[in-house]
Image: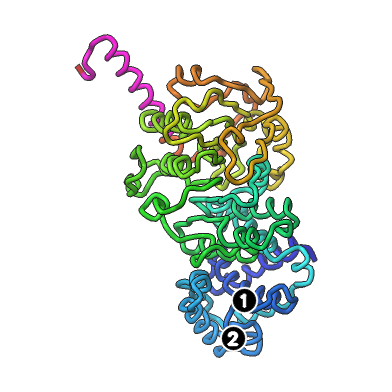
Amino acid sequence: MTNNDIVQKLWNLCDVLRDDGINYSDYVTELVLLLFIKMEHENAQSGVLSAHKLPDYARWDVFTNLSGVNLLNDYRSTLLKLSQHTDPLISAIYADAQTRLREPRHLEQLIKSLDGIDWFSAQKDGLGDLYEGLLEKNATETKSGAGQYFTPRPLIDSIIALVQPQAGETIQDPAAGTAGFLIAADAYIKANTDDLYDLDAKAQAFQRNQAYLGMELVPDTRRLALMNCLLHGMEGDEQGVIHLGNTLGSAGSQLPHSDIILSNPPFGTAKGGGMPTRDDLTFDTSNKQLAFLQHIYRRLKDGGRAAVVLPDNVLFEAGIGADIRRDLMDKCNLHTILRLPTGIFYAQGVKTNVLFFSKISDAATASTQNVWVYDLRANMPKFGKRTPFTRAHFADFEAAYAPLVPCGKGAGAEGHEPHGPRTDQGDTGRFRVFDRDWIRERGDSLDISWLKDDNTEDAADLPEPAVLAREAISELTGALAELEAILAELGEEVGG
């Protein structure tokens, strides 16, 4: 039985629990509360764990020896006690955890189904990978609505391969979701250090407890992320790898400067149109992606590097948007933009990009001289269940990108520039370079395209109305600003 088979078997259990009023998203949370206890049991049985993390009352054997109302009541009591446990990580994972199951027979069926899984096969592939497979299944099922917290793994793996995280570097995700970026960075480093055995004891401890840090606003999503990290051997500090908090609030201002920042910030505007409540961001904006972008380039160490997924409006929004892009290009070398295909995220019409940049310094100016743009959007297939989006779709981009110079902890900014032959493929190619003066002349817009897209969009492919409205407002605002500038040059008062 492969991990994919196990994931499908676990997913099918949701149909059983729907009689208890459990929807798909609630089901994953319900399942992982019990699944974590089961996985701890399996790890202890196989000798993977030297000591059991969970207390005696939360052992798997306790539940398998109970039935009926006694089982359900004991399980409820266990969740409450775990939420109050003295171990801060256990209490964080089970914070406010409550079962929504009302029928004892459903809990019994869930336990029996988990016992019926071929855990030897699951151990062979890694329980962390099994767990992440379940999260991915939840994200790709439109009925669950969880796609907003999950970045497609092929995209993450491609970004990690190009950013090349190294052992000893601190890696941050200020919008962690289920911790996909941090998990993939850890996997990359382990693959290049013989599962950390090439490192000394001090360096191994750093990788487990200090290398990774994320922040997540939604408690249930943070719970999934904490379990994900623990099952992959990433423990973090007392709060775990993923801290609970609002990056755009005071908690975000406490996040440290990092060598690498990888993120896919949430789309949309702040609720009620409010501004971030932080006082360390220069530009006030209700656009969450623009606010997150400020955090990312300001929280990079000098010489650090970042890759961030952002929607198109961040590239062309006028006013404050243009100010933030100029500030980014002053303080950092924004060397590459990848225009992503549509339809790879949960919101089918949202158009997204990946910005790759390296930090020079907060005091630097004119750090960006050239921006390379790779168009992976025009003339691409419509991705979905029939045409899955895979890592292979990034092959030409990765070859054209030319990898960054491998850089250890403390390397200078010059060590993070793309190297090797980059070729401008011209008007008919996907990879082109644009100099800073040309970008400045077009109002610092980075929404750059040149290929004619032969794919026609029907109504189902169009962005959500709110996205269309934001794009229209941004374009109108930009046009108004240009007209006001012309009037100013002519000595005319605006509105006169």
- In the image, taking residue 336 as reference, residue 190 lies left or right, namely right
Q: Which residue lies at the image location 67% right of the left edge and 46% below the top edge?
A: 157
Which portion, as a residue range, is magenta? 471-495
Decide: is 335 above or below 261.
Answer: above
- Residue 456 image offset from top left, x and y in percent: 61, 29
Q: Position of residue 45 (x, y in %)?
A: 73, 79
Q: Nearer the viewer, residue 93 or 236?
A: 236
**Residue topped by disc 1:** 37
Q: Residue at coordinates 64% horizontally, 66% vertically from top-left?
A: 231
Residue assigned mark 2: 56
Q: Is residue 114 visible?
A: no
Q: Viewed as shown, does residue 171 lie left or right of 493?
A: right
Q: Secondary structure at mark 1?
A: helix
* Left or right of residue 315, residue 180 in this image: right
Please indicate, yes or no, whether residue 255 appears anywhere in the rendered image. yes
Q: For the point 44% across and 41% down, which residue is it?
A: 298
**Residue at (65%, 60%) from the top-left corner?**
204
In this view, the residue in front, 195 or 434, is 195
Magenta stretch encompasses residue 149: no
Residue 15 higher or lower than 164, as above or below: below
Q: What kind of residue is marked 2?
A: Asp
Does residue 480 belong to the magenta stretch?
Answer: yes
Quarter occupied by residue 281 = top left
Q: Where is residue 244 drawn, in percent x and y? A: 45, 61
Q: How packed is label 2: few (under 14 Cα within 10 Å), some, or many (20 or more)?
A: few
Q: CA distance from mark 2 to mark 1?
A: 11 Å
Q: Quadrant of the N terminus?
A: bottom right
Q: Quadrant of the C terminus?
A: top left
